[in-house]
Image (cartoon, rainbow, N blue to C red):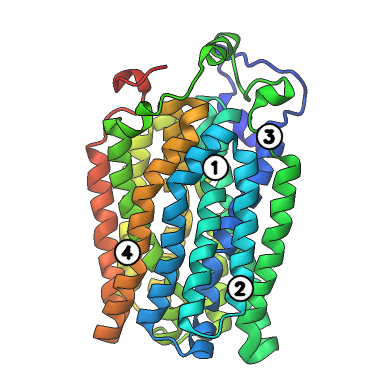
Amino acid sequence: MLRYLIDACDAGDSSLKPIKSSQFHYAWAILAVGTLVVFGALGLARFGYTMVLPAMQLGLGLSNTHAGALATANLSGYLALSVLGGALAARYGPRIIITAGLTLAAAGMLLTGLSSSFTSAAVWRALTGIGSGASNVPAMGLLAAWFVQHRRGLAAGVGVTGSSLALIVLGLLVPHILAAYGVNGWRICWFLFAGVTLGLALLAFIILRNSPSELGLLPVGALKDSAMVTEKVSGLSWGRVYRSGIVWHLGLIYTAFGFSYIIYMTFFTKYLIAEGGYTQESAGRMFMLMGWLSLLCGLIWGAFSDKLGRKTALIVVYSIQTVAFGLFALWPSTPGFVFSAVLFGLTAWSIPAIMAATCGDLLGPRLAPAGLGFITLFFGIGQAAGPSIAGIMADSGHSLSPAMLLAAGVALLGAVGSLFLRSTTPEHNGISD
């Protein structure tokens, strides 16, 4: 089905005649497993914390400041491996790095469930983040090798739906586990997350391949001329990544998303329960609603960016998220919460999808993981700072509303920064092979 959704975007364009080696292209298997990698690396490892946070706070006696610090520990680990993971994947191949990363994330989640104090939980949340960064970034960068430029936005959009699937599963499953196992429910959740993620690591090792050439294939949608050009590229020109002005600009814009969305996601359930009067189950249903709505967000906005440009898509998405975060703080009632969740759900993972596609456009298949890893450094800095600042603000003001307003303001800065983004076409930016 994914293949037909993406193929539909080329329908009617007689100038495009992709090479077809078989009816089923192995790229669709890569895309399916890549989506599951995101499910484990981000969906369970990061967003699982959102759902278990209230119970985990009670179990370990954590304040909002502590809760924010645990999220920061996780995201700092992610930050530490985002650049290195992308660079290692570019040199040694994404398959082995993704497998190792998921295995490490699973170990971190298992040990988080065994934590007995804030300090031990912080260490294991950091380890989980390291594994997440080592697996998620290469997984998204891998898609650039298997899909040509005019399909990368859609492919990346499908990949990020792994997070959406996790929101749906978490919103449905976690409240029942917490109710069934009482004070130890949050520990059982982490054990379950770890087991699933370890299984995904094995699946990634079995299915993933580093490039179409390993199987004697061309990328989906490849033309003969573009395939010949791809074969001529050799070596890794690291300067194309680290000295490019537009790559640095993308990174700065990405910081705004990391800072703003993680405040919203980390304290989403906590805010609904503590200040909205929701129960754990009703908050879980809201979380699941957001997950269902976000299922197609990457696909929709990835296609939008393929047709109307990455810059335009970034401006529109950041603007919508500004409204979503602002509503959560300024309209603290069921209609406001629902409207906010709907707006965020419709755009949730679109910015990472657009960024992944843009790195593929600018840097080509081999350097795309390194480029995505580099801009994820900026994204990670924003992520690492957001929860701690929000937690301190919440404890100081006895409310999470100011932190949600801060998230809205930073998202608006992302929209403004996107206005000044230059063309993401390589020849317009002095980037070439």
Instruction: Give the residue drawn at x 35%, y 80%.
Output: 65
The amino acid at mark 2 is: Leu
Query: Which of the marked residues, 1 or 3, is nearer the chain's N terminus?
Result: 1
Q: Nearer the viewer, residue 134 or 248?
A: 134
Q: Nearer the viewer, mark 1 or mark 2?
A: 2
Badge 4 marks a residue whose secondary structure is: helix
Q: Give the label on residue 209, or none.
A: 3
Q: Nearer the viewer, residue 378 or 90?
A: 90
Task: Tell me the residue that label 4 is attached to.
Answer: 385
User: Is the residue 254 above or below the residue 67 in the image?
Assistant: above
Query: Which of the marked residues, 4 or 2, is nearer the chain's N terminus?
Result: 2
Q: CA distance from mark 2 to mark 3?
A: 30 Å
Q: Is residue 180 left or right of residue 370?
A: right
Instruction: Give the residue drawn at x 51%, y 17%.
Output: 234
Q: Are marks 2 and 3 in contact (CB under 8 Å)?
A: no
Q: Is residue 177 left or right of residue 71?
A: right
How would you rate the neighbour count of disc 3 (Cα within 10 Å): few for under 14, some for 14-19, many for 20 or more? many
How would you rate the neighbour count of disc 1 (Cα within 10 Å): few for under 14, some for 14-19, many for 20 or more? many
Q: CA distance from mark 1 to mark 3?
A: 12 Å
Q: Nearer the viewer, mark 2 or mark 3?
A: 2
Screen quadrant of the C terminus: top left
The amino acid at mark 1 is: Pro
